[in-house]
Structures are given as C-alpha cells and as structure tokens.
C-alpha cells in the first residue's frame, strides 16, 4: 500500500506546485464503505504537510482533511422523511446525506484566495457518540491551500455530487474486494456500538453498506485521476 500512497502524494504535490497562489488545491477520495479511504486520506494529508514542512520549516500545516461524514442528515431530519424507519435503517445511503450543503462548501472553497479578505470557512464533523453531525466544527483556514475530501459519494456521477467532483483538482478512487470490506465493516459496527454482535455487524453490512457500495461502484464518475487497490497489509485499514 505504501508504494501506492507515495505515488498519489507525488502526483498531488507536483500538481499543487503548479497551482496559482490564489487557488485552493482540492482532492476528492472516494470508495465504498470499508475500502480504507479514510486511512488513505489521513496519510495523504499528513505526507503533504510533511513535504511542505520540509521546504518551509516552522510553517503552519498547508493541508487539511475534511471527511464527508459531517453531511449526514441529522436523526431529527430522518424522522421527518416520508419513511422514517427506512431512512434510519438505511442511514449511510446517498439519500441520507445533504449533498447540496456539501456542494456549497466546495463552491465556497473554489472562490480565489485573497490574503486581505479571505476568512476561515467551516465544515461540519460527525460525533459518533451522539450519532449526529456537529456544525462548523472543522476550520478550513486561509493558509490551508490543500483540502483533502473523503467520502462514499464525493465522486458519484449524480447531482449534486458530480457538480462538486467537477470542481476538484484530483479525483481518486479506492478499490477493495467486497469480502475484505464486509469483514472490516462488521468489526467496525461492533466497535462503534451500532450493533452488539459480529453477526449483527455482518447483517448491517449486507443490508446497508454493501448495497450502497454497489451503487458507488456502478455510478462513480468516469474521469478519475488515480486508483488505489486497498489490500490488507501492515498498518493499513
């Protein structure tokens, strides 16, 4: 996996170096649930910051990681949907995310930077303890010239996701064997307290996560800039 990460970081760093100073360089990393895209996004962000620090010692981080989880609809909004039971059971499906608000964030970040007037822009995070988003919890500062986005639908070929993806500088997809994803997801659901048993974790993966993953694989945009094959090796996922 490390060779793949190094390749992507090199691609991003080379492209970033050529970007205008008033341009935020934005990367979208998509994949099905359990693909390891969060791990990849964090590693890419950290390595880009390390490269910047090496050439600008003592400077502030230039890259920031923004997961898509903060754009889950709240449980209160799910309660108001036509079929609340289905909405809660399928939480994580595309229709349970606020894609329009996510697009507005991307559009705001695409406005050219101006040191005299540009202020911080805030994105929501997700609190797994309360199982709901936290508004304005991630501060994207003017000095954050590189923003790494991660999520199931950040490269989905369906509006508004496709409109946001079109504004990215790089779009990467993390491929994973369905069986590997299923094992990761079942264990994750138990650890997060979503289910009590591993059997319950497999059931949730089979009835929600993996059907969502099938949609993501079928509807991902066609102009990806890179692909990573997620494998089980030391320190990954």
Image: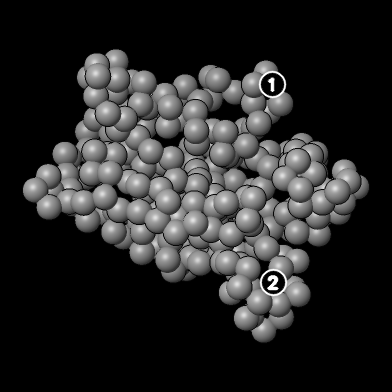
Location of the N terminus by quadrant is top right
> Badge 2, how many Cα within 10 Å: few under 14, some, many 20+?
many
**In the rendered image, which residue does mark 1 sit on?**
233
Classify mark 2: helix, strand or loop.
helix
Which is closer to the viewer, label 2 or label 1? 2
Location of the C terminus by quadrant is top right
At 8% across and 48% down in the image, what residue appears? Answer: 116
Question: Where does the image place residue 20, in percent across and percent down from the top left?
Answer: 17, 40
Q: Looking at the rendering, which quadrant does residue 147 occupy?
A: top left
At 40% across and 48% down in the image, what residue appears? Answer: 138
Residue 203 shows in this picture: yes
The answer to whether residue 116 is above or below residue 180 is below
Give 8 or 194, whichever is nearer the viewer. 194
**In the rendered image, which residue does mark 2 sit on?**
87
At 53% across and 19% down in the image, what residue appears? Answer: 3
At 43% across and 40% down in the image, what residue appears? Answer: 65
Give 186 or 194, whichever is nearer the viewer. 194
Classify residue 7 as left or right of residue 109.
right
The answer to whether residue 69 is above or below residue 35 is below
Count of labels in the image: 2
Q: Give the Cα separation between the discs numbered 2 and 1.
A: 35 Å
Question: Where does the image place residue 202, in percent across and percent down from the top left?
Answer: 85, 48
The answer to whether residue 27 is above or below residue 200 is above
């Amino acid at each position: 996996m490390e060779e793949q990460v190094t390749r992507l970081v090199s691609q991003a760093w080379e492209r970033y170096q050529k970007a205008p100073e008033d341009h935020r360089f934005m990367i979208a990393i998509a994949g099905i649930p359990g693909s390891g895209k969060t791990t990849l996004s964090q590693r890419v962000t950290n390595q880009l910051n390390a490269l910047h620090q090496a050439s600008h010692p003592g400077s502030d981080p230039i890259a920031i990681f923004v997961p898509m989880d903060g754009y889950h609809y709240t449980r209160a909004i799910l309660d108001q949907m036509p079929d609340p039971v289905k909405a809660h059971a399928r939480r994580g499906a595309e229709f349970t995310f606020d894609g329009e608000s996510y697009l507005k964030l991307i559009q705001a970040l695409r406005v050219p930077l101006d040191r005299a007037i540009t202020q911080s822009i805030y994105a929501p995070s997700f609190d797994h303890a309360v199982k709901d988003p936290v508004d304005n919890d991630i501060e994207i500062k003017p000095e954050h010239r590189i923003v790494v986005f991660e999520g199931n639908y950040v490269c989905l070929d369906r509006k508004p996701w496709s409109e946001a993806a079109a504004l990215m500088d790089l779009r990467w997809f993390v491929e994973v064997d369905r069986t590997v994803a299923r094992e990761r997801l079942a264990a994750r659901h138990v650890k997060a307290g979503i289910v009590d048993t591993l059997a319950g974790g497999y059931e949730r993966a089979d009835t929600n996560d993996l059907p969502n993953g099938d949609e993501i694989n079928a509807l991902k945009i066609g102009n990806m800039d890179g692909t990573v094959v997620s494998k089980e090796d030391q320190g990954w996922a």
